[in-house]
Image: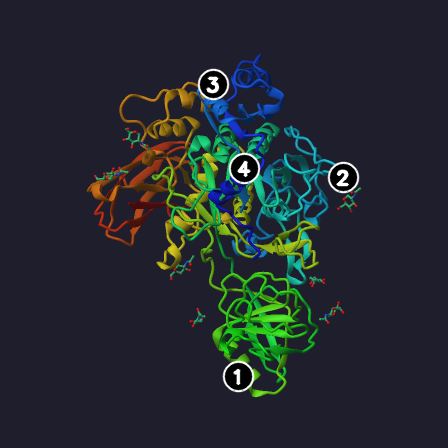
Amino acid sequence: MASLGFLSLSSLLLLCLCSASATVEDDRKAYIVYMGALPSDSQYSAMSHHQHILQQVTSSVENSLVRNYGRSFNGFEAKLTESEREKLSAMEGVVSVFPSMKLSLQTTRSWDFMGFGDNFKRNPEIESDIVIGVIDSGIWPESKSFSDKGLSPPPAKWKGVCKGGLNFTCNNKLIGARFYVGESARDLSGHGTHTSSTAAGSKVEGASFYGIANGTARGGVPSARIATYKVCEDELCDSGSILAAFDDAIADAVDVITISIGGAPAALDYDPISIAAFHAMDKGILTVNSAGNSGPISGSVGSISPWILTVAASTTDRKFITKVALGNGKELSGTSINGFKLNGTKFPFSYGKSGSNSCSEDDVRRCKSGCIDSTLDGKILVCDQPLLKGSIGSSKPAGVIIQGNVSRPVISTVPLAFLPEDQYSLLTSYIKSTAKPEGTILKTETTNGVDAPVMATFSSRGPNTILGDILKPDITAPGVNILAAYSAVATLVPGIDDGRRSSYNFLSGTSMACPHVAGVAAYLKTIHPKWSPSTIKSAIMTTAWPMNASSSEEVNEFAYGSGHLNPTKAADPGLVYEITGDDYLKMLCSANYTAGELKAIAGRAVSCPEGPNLAIKDLNYPSLSVRFNSSSKPSEITFSRTVTNVGPASSTYKAKVVSSSDLKVEIEPNTLSFKSVGEKKLFIVKVSGMSSADFESATLVWSDGSRTVRSPIVIYT
Ligand SMILES: *[C@@H]1O[C@H](CO)[C@@H](O)[C@H](O)[C@H]1NC(C)=O
Ligand SMILES: *[C@@H]1O[C@H](CO)[C@@H](O)[C@H](O)[C@H]1NC(C)=O
Ligand SMILES: *[C@@H]1O[C@H](CO)[C@@H](O)[C@H](O)[C@H]1NC(C)=O
Ligand SMILES: *[C@@H]1O[C@H](CO)[C@@H](O)[C@H](O)[C@H]1NC(C)=O
Ligand SMILES: *[C@@H]1O[C@H](CO)[C@@H](O)[C@H](O)[C@H]1NC(C)=O
Ligand SMILES: *[C@@H]1O[C@H](CO)[C@@H](O)[C@H](O)[C@H]1NC(C)=O
Ligand SMILES: *[C@@H]1O[C@H](CO)[C@@H](O)[C@H](O)[C@H]1NC(C)=O
């Protein structure tokens, strides 16, 4: 499988327990002690404060302290016993103490597919002032995708460094490198190289996977700079390192952060990515994060914070065709990503029993585990159903043909083709018709034009299990079979070494979708340098392509949020939904955080008013959602929103509502007239006519005739 796993945290925690019991002498575990924002006092030393705090709970600070955070927010990681942890949790200035855990990692056709091709107007000079911070598994600096040809020295505002370790050099493309795990920032798994080049790779002609999908590879902003922060090794990413990477990236002055890492949903003050992204947002830096690969299970989306832009994954219109040529001259058409060249050499087919084998003929044809003939060397194995990993054992088939429809062709370690039923039955009748059936598998060809985008089954689904009234994921983007740069040392199929290496590879995952959105966010920064993270996020969400709901595999707003990334429209959204740092804090008041906790998080006084606070549903979010207790659904619900005019000064927008259910939606007022840029208008959305269904949705569209500002409305129980 080409997708990088998005292991659930519960299984990882089991792993942690196992290793903890192995080390009997040390009952300490690593914890993150989160202390919120840095005090504004210029005399303040985070390091000595951390020492002082630790001294009060442990006799050996040196043995306990793992690392400090103190460039962009406050806190540290330390090894603590249970009683030390309890004491620390109660101390003044400590917001939360939570276990350090392992999170997991979760082309170029994709940009053309969205109309954001090479000819799209852009300004390389301004673009080169933008720095994308990539928090991932590092980078392969020698990849052609990170060539700095034509780029000037780093922008003056850049405060980062190139500390990539031994034998690691930066250039004017890759301007920053830091690593928190391993020996250097060099990418050994390919994941970080892939995401970095998708976001901001330079233009590379003739990029392909063994000639498949040969074309020009480039990132969303090919002239922007990349700073790499390596936090993952062996596909696991340590939360303490993630916090350290954000602490540095914010202080280094990156413009956008892309992080294709995540785990199970966690409370806002216990989730390292939420915590760190809040501080990034407060400094004007948008964090783009992958939704997770745990779909289509309901509630599986791990990235739930309103200040993060959460990205789901869907397909592009690229189709992979792998033909099978038979001995009789006929060709069958299947699918896979087969980079192997058999040069037209014909190999005998092995289908069913050929010698002594205690399995039934049907089981051998199904290639059931333990039923495959041992004499496969130099033959093409034909199977009625997919093989289990390892069932071929040590034999070396020349190829494998499997009956099946695959929506997501993958790379395999042998020549492989999946044939749909009709083609497969032609193959089996040919095999039965001749004494010496033989054939070959051709290299994969690609064409464009299949129906797309289609949501990927693996893409994590809402609802948001922590903040039920914030719709997540926010948007979907290409994340299936994305060709991008790869580490020169990484195996092509993660975890299985077939000896091959390639500087470009196909990967699938919300990990691959995330840097597409980060690239567009960076592009918006070049056109609108003053736009805040919430403005950029709103522009991307309200201009998204509408996606169609379908009952299969839970495809609705919980899968794709506002719709599909539409780079060509995002720069001119007309109206935006802006949210300030204080708005988020007020919203957190109604999520029952105390004023004390919020002050620590924000680094400034926050007054949670007595009585009703800003309801979570009324946060000025670009999508509208509310969760009800099924037994207490009201007859009417209202949302309030404020839009800011970022289009032409004088403009008038009219509201339109599209509802496929019985929901009745009224907008008051339903016409908004603006006279200046930056002008704000408030409106109310009244929803009634709720049925007993547990999911209902509608769409609100503001339009001035040329711009459309779309927001999904989701009511669920
Ligand atoms: C440094 O990295 C390059 C690129 O992988 C490699 O070719 C070279 O052998 C490395 N040199 C050392 C000293 O490790
Ligand atoms: C890719 O296409 C280019 C230009 O058409 C060609 O020169 C090159 O040989 C191709 N590469 C592969 C690996 O097929
Ligand atoms: C096909 O030809 C290439 C180049 O001549 C060679 O490297 C490869 O081993 C051949 N493959 C087979 C299966 O004969
Ligand atoms: C495979 O796809 C074909 C054509 O879309 C369809 O008729 C057939 O039922 C599918 N088979 C399976 C096993 O899903
Ligand atoms: C949604 O359905 C409409 C009408 O069938 C179709 O034209 C459109 O392409 C579909 N959109 C997507 C994203 O599939
Ligand atoms: C906050 O506390 C109030 C009162 O205890 C409760 O009704 C409400 O559901 C809580 N809200 C959240 C988001 O937990
Ligand atoms: C939902 O309503 C039931 C019955 O009124 C109540 O027992 C339950 O606590 C409610 N749940 C929530 C999450 O408010």
Q: Amino acid at mark 4?
A: Ser
**Element at label 3:** loop
Residue 571 shows up from this direction = no
Respond yes or no on whether mark 2 lies under 8 Å from ligand 1: yes
Mark in the foreground, 3 or 4: 4
Work out whether mark 3 precedes mark 2 in sequence or the reverse, and give the earlier one.
Answer: 3
Q: CA distance from mark 2 to mark 4?
A: 38 Å
In the rendered picture of this protein, how many numbered marks are placed on residues? 4
Task: Give 124 or 692, whichever is nearer the viewer.
Answer: 692
Q: Which residue is mark 2?
A: 167
Work out whether mark 1 precedes mark 3 in sequence or the reverse, and give the earlier one.
Answer: 3
Residue 265, how many percent across, how many down?
A: 43, 40
Residue 458 shows up from this direction = yes
Q: Which residue is mark 4?
A: 21
Mark in the foreground, 3 or 2: 3
Q: Amino acid at mark 2?
A: Asn
Say if 150 sits above or below 375 in the image: above
